[in-house]
Image: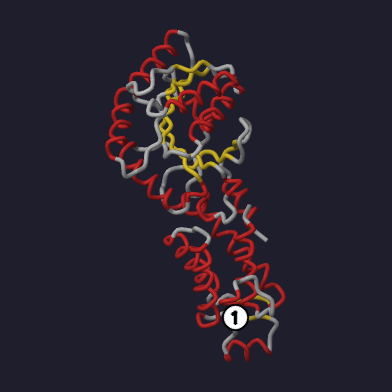
Amino acid sequence: MFDFLKKKISGFVDKISGKKESTFPSSIKEERVKLTISTHVKSLFSNEIELGENDIRSALNDFELELLEGNVALAVAEQIKEELRRELIGKKVKKNELQQQITSMFFNSIKSIMLENTGIPIIEQLDEIKTRPIKIMFTGPNGSGKTTTIAKIANLLKKNNYSVVIAAADTFRAAAIEQMEFHGHALGIKVIKGKYGADPTSVAFDAVNHAKAHNIDIVLIDTAGRQETNLNLLNELKKMARVINPELKIYVGESIAGNSVIEQVGMFDKELKLDGLILTKLDCDTKGGTVISISKVTHVPVLYITIGQGYEDIEKFDGDKIARNIGI
């Protein structure tokens, strides 16, 4: 999943250590960092190298560029670069441990970024919410996997002995209603729907009333996919949030969407005050940069990731685990 960044770490280490082989693209492979004369002379009389600014500047700049090409947001790439710079300058490293030292520094930098914004999974939040039914509203753009993600959450809740009803409140697409009905039938969960073009808030309201009448624990509310630039549709979501007053508002976004997902989450959070984020299609994110960026920049806690199409293909976001996957 993170082969791209693994190669970048190896390339960065190769450039500092002066190895002949490098995993960097051929366009910059020859720009290998060489120790300054002063550093080189000092190292002749010791088995340690004390790295200076001039020893690492070129490698850090190239590494930042590679992170940007790997879909890491500019601000995050700059932070990684600066943290590594502070760690490396003046660092005394044994010649034969340079690879291990650099890898450890990179791992800790990535790990700290992702752990800053790891959220509490929905399942673990439910006991703290005394309201019944608990209303969870899902938002996000078209094609993000929102409907399938709702089905995965419904399956997760059901397996944890919560009763669930789904509101098919994406009334702008008849196919969305049909898709949600399909998932509901497969999971044995009732789906409350309206006609194509019906008021989405009314559908959500009917689902909440159904849950109250039948002592159902949780209402999962699907909504129409919206781009962050469509203010009219965002206002429709704000209306639903005012009327329904959901306990949780969750954004579902693609991990492969690159930096655009950061802008989307930012706008949705501004308008709706999001409570959490679910990243989909992480199994398709070969570069891994988006998951690093979004956990740092948006300040919306990441709750879950999805890694396939099956109902079981969802797991709580584990920044430590993902950081270990990136390591060599």
Position in image of residue 235 (x %, y %): 28, 34
Which is nearer the eye, 187 or 275? 187
Q: Quadrant of residue 206?
A: top left
81 above or below 322?
A: below
Q: Amino acid at mark 1?
A: Arg
Which is nearer the eye, 280 or 121? 280
96 above or below 233?
A: below
Q: Residue at x 48, y 34 (%)?
A: 146
Q: Quadrant of residue 99?
A: bottom right
Which is nearer the eye, 257 or 220? 257
Q: Residue at x 40, y 27 (%)?
A: 170
Q: Residue at x 47, y 21 (%)?
A: 166
Q: Is residue 200 left or right of residue 182?
A: left
Q: Residue furthest top?
A: 213
**The C terminus: image quadrant:** bottom right
Q: Is the residue marked by circle 1 packed among few (<14), some (14-19), or many (20+) residues within 10 Å?
A: many
Residue at numbered disc 1:
32
Position in image of residue 45 (x %, y %): 68, 89
163 above or below 280?
A: above
Position in image of residue 64 (x %, y %): 50, 68
Q: Quadrant of residue 204?
A: top left
Q: Residue at x 51, y 63 (%)?
A: 69
Q: Secondary structure at mark 1?
A: loop
Q: Residue furthest right?
A: 96
Position in image of residue 4 (x %, y %): 61, 60
